[in-house]
């Protein structure tokens, strides 16, 4: 067996052996996240408008590059930095993205922010009126007896 054949077999076995597959994936992901960010063209929807995802990615890349420049760091942004910046920007418009950012950074703060949320918030106006009428009836009933 030649060295090249052995290397090919080792590479193929990275994902077939459960003991090493997770480690192999982790190494590939780490290398990718630490590499320079890709400069993507603007993606357009079917009407020819730039998609919001494309705008978020472009703004995230520019924001990270500006932050590195302000810190006198002379290197291109890494993919990981742009991914995090894009997630933070997206969190302004998407509650699930906000929850992920809060979970990863602030832990229990999310529960503290939801203090004002109650069980009646999801009810429609009609449902609230029916509930109010039922409560009024229940309060009036003991007086009638």
Image (cartoon, rainbow, N blue to C red):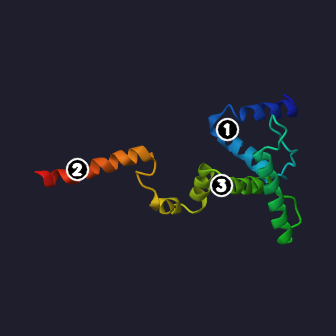
Left or right: residue 102 versus residue 62 is left
Q: Circle 3 is placed at which residue position? A: 91
**SS class, disc 2:** helix
| Residue mark closest to the camera, 2 vs 3 | 2
Cα gap from disc 1 to disc 3, whole angstroms: 32 Å
Mark 1 touches mark 3? (CB < 8 Å): no
Which disc, if any, is residue 138? 2
| Residue mark closest to the camera, 2 vs 1 | 2
- Farthest top residue? 1
Q: Position of residue 55 (x, y in %)?
A: 80, 50
11 up-or-down from 75: above or below: above
Sooner in the amino-acid sequence: mark 1 or mark 3 = 1
Q: Circle 1 is placed at which residue position? A: 21
Q: Quadrant of the N terminus?
A: top right
Q: Which residue sits at x=73%, y=57%? A: 85
142 up-or-down from 127: above or below: below
99 up-or-down from 44: above or below: below
Q: Nearer the viewer, residue 135 or 68?
A: 135
Which disc, if any, is residue 126? none
Q: Residue 80: in sight, yes or no? A: yes
Q: Label 3: few (<14), some or many (≥20) within 10 Å?
A: some
Q: Residue 123: in sight, yes or no? A: no
Mark 2 touches mark 1? (CB < 8 Å): no
Q: Which residue sits at x=72%, y=36%? A: 14
Q: Which residue sits at x=87%, y=58%? A: 76
Asked which quadrant contains residue 124, the reply is top left
- Farthest front residue? 144
Q: Which residue sits at x=86%, y=46%? A: 40
């Amino acid at each position: 067996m030649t060295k090249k054949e052995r290397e090919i077999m080792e590479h193929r076995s990275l994902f077939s052996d459960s003991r090493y597959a997770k480690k192999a994936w982790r190494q590939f992901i780490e290398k990718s996240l630490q590499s320079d960010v890709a400069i993507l063209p603007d993606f357009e929807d079917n009407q020819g408008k730039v998609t919001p995802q494309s705008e978020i990615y472009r703004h995230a890349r520019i924001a990270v590059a500006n932050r590195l420049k302000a810190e006198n760091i002379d290197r291109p942004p890494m993919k990981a930095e742009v991914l995090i910046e894009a997630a933070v920007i997206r969190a302004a418009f998407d509650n699930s993205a906000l929850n992920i950012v809060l979970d990863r950074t602030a832990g229990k703060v999310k529960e503290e922010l939801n203090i004002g949320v109650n069980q009646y918030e999801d009810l429609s106006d009609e449902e609230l009126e029916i509930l109010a009428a039922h409560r009024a009836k229940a309060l009036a009933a003991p007086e009638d007896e």
